[in-house]
Amino acid sequence: MRVAYVTALRKTPTSSSYARSDRMASSNERPLPTPISAAAGGSGGNPPPGRPTTVDSMLLDKGAAMLQALRPVKHIKQHVCTFALYAHDPRRQVETHHFVSRLNQDVLQCAVYDADDKHARLIGVEYIVSRKIFDSLPAEEQRLWHSHAHEIKAGLWVSPHVPGMLEKAELEKMAGTFGKFWCTWQVDRGDRLPLGAPALMVSPQDDPAADVRPDLVRNRDDKYRYSTTELRAARADVAVPAEPRPGQADYWLRHRKGFAVDVVPHEMKCHAPFP
């Protein structure tokens, strides 16, 4: 029987006592040193390894872009900049750039990058649902989802270059939504390629354990010429749900227990005999 690998969720304390069971876990520790890891001399700002793009490849890309519809990509209509915390260690925080498309009024999907320029790295995906959809989820599933009300009220969630008056109506809707965000590329750890298992991410909250580092906020504000303090004041009248954390939302914050992902051996289902 061949052995396949699957991911398994494992509860872990959100403290420095967190211990990994192996090198494929989504923990603070870097994977084993390789030419593509920071342990081998890379850094979070380093580009991935590889040769420069050739002229032939660039020509192919331009031709394909002219001939193909690329409908899923062209359905992306919004850019949101905010911050995310690792569920197993909220002290690790990253600035994120969500490129949002709507499947319908209750379900959105976001390709998440570490920047908004042409060299940005795709670091994960977030799904966003309305309160109605969230309430329909089983309790075990709800534990993986986070609320958005605080990061919107606090001025952390922004739509760069969109006028505040136009953004306001969308903020009212988003304040009552919930997200599930998987990070597949831990650039803050210095990884030059996606390494190891994905990590569950959570949102900033009005709690000392979930505050965003001031330097991250300052860098974002300087880049887009925002004042988070002024945004917070301007959003004082944004309505938030009377129960901002229904069900098992923001489970890690309530119970001080995070989730990490390990890659573990598992017997593969065989539908036909192996030769």
Image: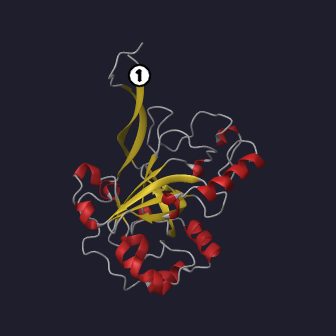
Q: Pinpoint residue 153: horizontal percent, then vertical percent.
A: 41, 77
From the image, tell me which residue sits under label 1. Answer: 3
Decide: is 52 above or below 142: above
Residue 2 seen in this snapshot: yes
Residue at 57% over, 40% down: 30
Residue 106 or 37: which is nearer the viewer?
106
The single residue placed furthest to the front in the displayed view is 67
Q: Name the quadrant of the C terminus.
A: top left
Residue at 44% over, 43% down: 17
Residue 150 or 133: which is nearer the viewer?
133
Residue at 39% over, 69% down: 206
Decide: is 119 above or below 229: above
Q: Quadrant of residue 102?
A: bottom left
Residue at 37% over, 47% down: 259
Q: Pinpoint residue 87: horizontal percent, then vertical percent.
A: 42, 52
Q: Name the quadrant of the N terminus.
A: top left
The type of colouring in the image is secondary structure
Q: Pinpoint residue 160: horizontal percent, then vertical percent.
A: 56, 75
Q: Quadrant of residue 225?
A: bottom right
Specify few, some or many for label 1: CA neighbours under 10 Å numbering under 14, 14-19, or 20 or more: few
Amino acid at the residue labelled 1: Val
Q: Quadrant of residue 20?
A: top left
Residue 106 or 69: which is nearer the viewer?
69
Residue 54 seen in this snapshot: no
